[in-house]
Amino acid sequence: MPEVLKAPLVVEFPFTRSLGPVQSAFLTGLRERVVLGVTTADGRTLVPPVEYDPVTAEELRDLVEVAPTGTVTTWAWNHEPRRGQPLATPFAWVLVRLDGADTAILHALDAPGPEAVRTGMRVRIRWAGDRTGAITDIACFEPYDGEAVRPAGHPGEFEDAVAGIVAHARLDYTYSPGRAQSAYITALSARRTVGERCPSCRKVYVPPRGACPTCGVATDEQVEVGPAGTVTTFCIVNIKAKNLDIEVPYVYAHIALDGAGLALHGRIGGIPYDQVRMGLRVEPVWTEGGRYPDHYRPTGEPDADYETYKELL
């Protein structure tokens, strides 16, 4: 049985979103060291503000300034801060109900240790030095034993309002492909493609999944397929992907390897993109030291008859 593989993976992308009038005013206010909430028809003040009442679904537009001081309603100690969190040293995650608000805002509290944090303690905002119109304009909260700060009554109108934000999403995790796909990857490094046959329906799955999704039974009979195959469907890619050194346009296709009961993905090369077609017979092209085919190219054989691959579309 081959060693089960695992590898660290990162999924990361910038997410750009536009802001409506309420969120725009809130984030612009943070840039100007002003905290704005929104009032509901029954007199509640929601901070952070939302565009619709969570109880009645009524649209909300009435902005009101609240104080930068408040009270901790609940908390949890963070012993090991992670990359991208507000503070690099241990801190408390806190829900703070700012003076003048009826809801709490989540942020970090800079405290020397968990013994210094308690529900009901008074805190205030520590503003970031460089503010751009984002929640990070609040660097964190800090303990405060002074008088409550009276808001100036800002109307929530700004000349240079923030219209949109870019949020950088990132997920770090360790992926293990499991027994079946570990065997598949190991075989690829030897320039072989293996699938697994279902003992019930006899379909050969490539890449193998360890179980038949149709019959629901385990698969463990290995079957070598290919190396040649047939293009079943394809698309022409016209947008260049970041960090992918392939010139556009190029073709990405579903390829049914000979003996497989399922088509896999692969790039088609060695032929002009506008000559790729359904039924084209192709074979893998390996690069020196590569652990998987770099692309597939035409074999020169006659095109496959539609009847031979129509069930694999």
Image: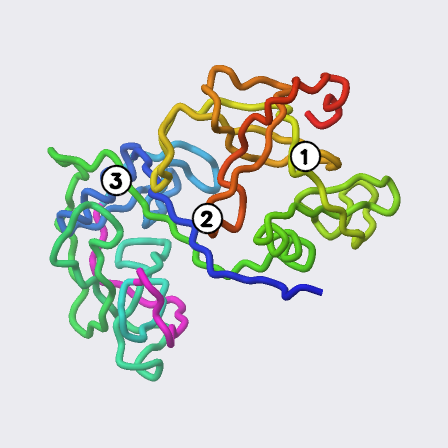
**Image quarter hosting the C terminus:** top right
- Give the alpha-carbon distance from disc 3 to disc 1, as whole Å: 62 Å
Q: Residue furthest front?
A: 300
Where is the N terminus found, in terms of image quarters? bottom right
Residue 1, relative to residue 117: is it above or below? above
- Discs 2/3, front: 2
Q: Earlier in the sequence, mark 1 or mark 2?
A: 1
Residue 40 showing in the rendered view: no
Which image quarter: residue 2? bottom right
The residue sitting at 33% across, 77% down in the picture is 117
Q: Residue 83 in magenta? A: yes
Question: Which badge, 2 or 3, is on the more N-terminal residue?
Answer: 3
Task: Tell me if 51 is positioned left or right of 256 in this view.
Answer: left
Residue 264 percent across, percent down from the top left: 62, 36
From the viewer's side, name the closer residue of 286 and 153. 286
| Relative side of 142 to 6, left or right | left
The part of the chain drawn in magenta is: 65-85
Based on the displayed image, in which of its 4 quarters is residue 205 positioned?
top right
Q: Amino acid at mark 2?
A: Glu
**What residue is drawn where x is 77% and y is 41%?**
204
**SS for dot 3:** strand
Query: Residue 196: x, y in percent?
Result: 75, 48
Tag of residue 63:
3
**Label ID, residue 257:** 1
Between the residue at mark 2 and the residue at mark 3, the CA separation in whole angstroms equals: 63 Å
Residues at badges 3 and 1 in contact (C-beta under 8 Å)? no
Which residue is labeled 2 in the image?
288
Residue sitting at x 28%, y 46% = 37
**Disc 1 on helix, strand or loop?**
strand
Whichever of labels 3 and 1 marks the residue nearer the N terminus, that label is: 3
